[in-house]
Image (cartoon, rainbow, N blue to C red):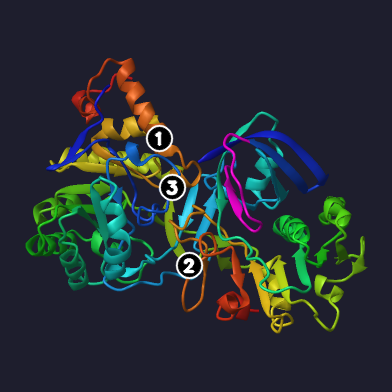
């Protein structure tokens, strides 16, 4: 178990913020991995993608969704929180050269941002497609580090307050030239675009599910299919083939 | 240092702390996250004869005062457990308690027979899962069935039997007595409380299994009272479980009559909870110059009347 002391809370909009923690023990991570973070006063820790980690300084990009995330937004610097990290399987590296596309729905950028940085440092040509409900959920200044490296990016909002008006898939050209795609966003988005990307040789999805333990012990966060997999341990990153028999994908 | 050693029948535990079945997987998942030195035993997830898929998601729902779950006893089945999980547990140098489950009496007996292995110290008989249609609480809520199944298990396997019961506040005495007469070696009180939650916006239950089991803080005073009552009607050692989050609550359980304790949901908000409760128990004894935790057991029953 690790512990983190709150350094700062940087708020982007009413319900979007970066929580910066100073870790007691240094750890390393790979993009796509997550942490279970104590949420004061609540019975369950919460899973968050590791957004950035430099030395012992760790940050999470968090959207307020309920009492757990609200309790984190209310924290003051100095507060110590328990956490478990790094957890889960990371995004695998591309197996071939060629374009890599990242598709983020809203807060889904949290796991794709470190992946983008990693891939660009490795010399991959990366395109980011990022959609959200409105500009307040699209903290695009975060992208500066990626832009500096020459990232090509496309933004959309449902209300048209930033980028193209519409959904993230409206940004996608009719011919998908990607050799590898990484997708992180809400279930609704994954359902809409799953088959659009089916012919891309390698597609990886990062999924979100309610968790209690984060380490495979409680069996709460299961991917319901013929063969059950836990999102925390066998995920959160799955290949498109893993999701083919996923019940949630079939339900409308 | 003050002694935290405790006995469950002939089984000696070096501390009274152990995980509650179902919250700790098969024991390997939390290894490395905290020091297992503070544990007195490992208790596995309930195992059935064949693998079980469990209930569809959502399987968990958080409330301010507790957690609802409807995992539905998903497990890898006894054969895979013996092959893939037991070898790791055997290396821990801790008593191994395997929780067993069956939809029928015959299944319980078969599972128990397969576990007649030297490295396993006891079986916890799960007669109280609220999340399955067959077996589960159907067994634990009837004194006749508890008696029958425990005597059958006693006749067919040599391991000590810990009987895990539901938090049924009204039939406690009959059920505990039935378990004792059947030959139980210990009683674990309590499992989760049957419960449900509905989303009023959609009109749908918020658990895939529709109903589930309530654990966490709300359960503590209910469990404490059941340990207190059970202590008055049985000579069997009692393992207290239910909403145990703190050292103070651990002491309360022991004073109510528990010989050992199980920690469940608390690990989901604090993975260090075993270590913290362990050091609280040591400090509590030290501050009072007590050499042995056993001196606190059932303390509340020593008083003839409660001067408040």
Relative to the observer, which residue lies in front, B72 or B111? B111
Mark 2 or 1, which is nearer the eye?
1
Residue at image coords 12%, 50%: B180
Dot 3 or dot 1, earlier in sequence: 3
Tell me residue A250's x, y (percent).
Answer: 61, 81
Element at badge 1?
A: helix
Crowding at dot 1, Cα within 10 Å, few <14 / some 14-19 / many 20+, comes out as some
Camera-nearest residue between B288 and A238: A238
Of tags 3 and 1, which is closer to the observer? 1
Q: Which chain is indicated by disc 3? A: B
Is residue A98 placed above or below B37 in the rendered structure? Answer: below
The residue sitting at 66% across, 41% down in the picture is A71
**Residue at the location (92% across, 60% down)?**
A161
Determine which residue is flagged by label 3.
B265
Q: Residue furthest left?
A: B155
Secondary structure that dominates the magenta span? loop
Per the image, label 2 sits on a secondary structure element best described as loop
User: Looking at the image, is mark 3 or mark 2 earlier in the sequence?
Assistant: 2
Query: Which span is picked out in magenta?
Result: A23-38
Looking at the image, residue A73 lies above or below residue A197 = above
Residue closest to the eye, A97 or B100: A97
Q: Quadrant of residue B134?
A: bottom left
Give me the C-alpha separation between circle 2 and circle 1.
Answer: 35 Å
Closer to the camera: disc 3 or disc 2? 3
Which residue in the protein does label 2 denote?
B210
């Amino acid at each position: 178990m690790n512990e983190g002391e709150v350094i700062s809370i940087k708020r982007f909009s009413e319900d979007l913020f970066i929580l910066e923690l100073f870790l007691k023990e240094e750890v390393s991570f790979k993009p796509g991995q997550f942490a279970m973070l104590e949420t004061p006063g609540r019975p369950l820790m919460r899973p968050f993608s590791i957004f950035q980690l430099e030395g012992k300084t760790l940050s999470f990009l968090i959207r307020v969704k309920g009492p757990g995330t609200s309790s984190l937004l209310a924290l003051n610097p100095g507060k110590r929180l328990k956490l478990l990290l790094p957890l889960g399987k990371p995004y695998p590296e591309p197996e071939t050269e060629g374009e890599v596309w990242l598709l983020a729905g809203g807060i889904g950028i949290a796991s794709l941002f470190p992946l983008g940085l990693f891939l660009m440092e490795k010399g991959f040509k990366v395109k980011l497609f990022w959609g959200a409900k409105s500009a307040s959920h699209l903290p695009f200044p975060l992208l500066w580090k990626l832009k500096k490296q020459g990232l090509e990016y496309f933004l959309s909002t449902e209300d048209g307050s930033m980028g193209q008006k519409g959904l993230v898939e409206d940004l996608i050209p009719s011919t998908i030239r990607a050799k590898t795609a990484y997708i992180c966003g809400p279930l609704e988005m994954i359902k809409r675009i799953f088959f659009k990307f089916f012919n891309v040789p390698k597609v990886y999805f990062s999924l979100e599910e309610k968790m209690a333990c984060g380490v495979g012990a409680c069996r709460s966060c299961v991917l319901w299919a013929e063969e059950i997999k836990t999102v925390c341990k066998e995920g959160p990153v799955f290949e498109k083939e893993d999701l083919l028999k996923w019940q949630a994908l079939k339900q409308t | 240092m003050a002694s935290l050693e405790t006995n469950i029948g002939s089984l000696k535990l070096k501390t009274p702390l152990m995980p509650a079945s179902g919250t700790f997987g098969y024991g390997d998942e939390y290894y490395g996250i905290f020091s297992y030195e503070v544990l007195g035993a490992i208790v596995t997830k309930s195992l059935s004869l064949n693998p079980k898929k469990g209930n569809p998601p959502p399987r968990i729902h958080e409330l301010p005062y507790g957690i609802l779950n409807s995992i539905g006893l998903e497990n890898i089945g006894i054969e895979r457990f013996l092959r893939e999980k037991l070898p790791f547990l055997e290396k821990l140098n801790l008593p191994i308690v395997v929780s067993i489950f069956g939809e029928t009496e015959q299944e319980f007996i078969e599972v128990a027979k397969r576990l007649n292995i030297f490295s396993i110290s006891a079986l916890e008989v799960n007669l109280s899962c609220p999340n399955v249609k067959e077996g589960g609480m159907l067994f634990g809520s009837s004194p006749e069935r508890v008696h029958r199944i425990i005597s059958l298990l006693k006749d067919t396997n040599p391991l000590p039997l810990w009987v895990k019961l539901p938090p049924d506040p009204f039939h406690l005495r009959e059920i505990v007595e039935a378990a004792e007469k059947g030959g139980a070696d210990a009683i674990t009180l309590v499992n989760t409380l049957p419960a449900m939650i509905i989303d009023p916006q959609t009109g749908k239950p918020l658990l895939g299994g529709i109903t589930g089991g309530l654990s966490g803080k709300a359960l503590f005073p209910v469990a404490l009272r059941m340990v207190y009552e059970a202590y008055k009607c049985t000579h069997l050692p009692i393992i207290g479980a239910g909403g145990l989050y703190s050292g103070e609550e651990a002491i309360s359980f022991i004073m109510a009559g528990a010989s050992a304790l199980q920690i469940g949901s608390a690990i989901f908000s604090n993975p260090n909870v075993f270590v913290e409760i362990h050091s609280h128990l040591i400090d509590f004894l030290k501050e009072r110059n007590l050499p042995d935790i056993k001196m606190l057991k059932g303390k509340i029953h020593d008083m003839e009347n409660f001067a408040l």
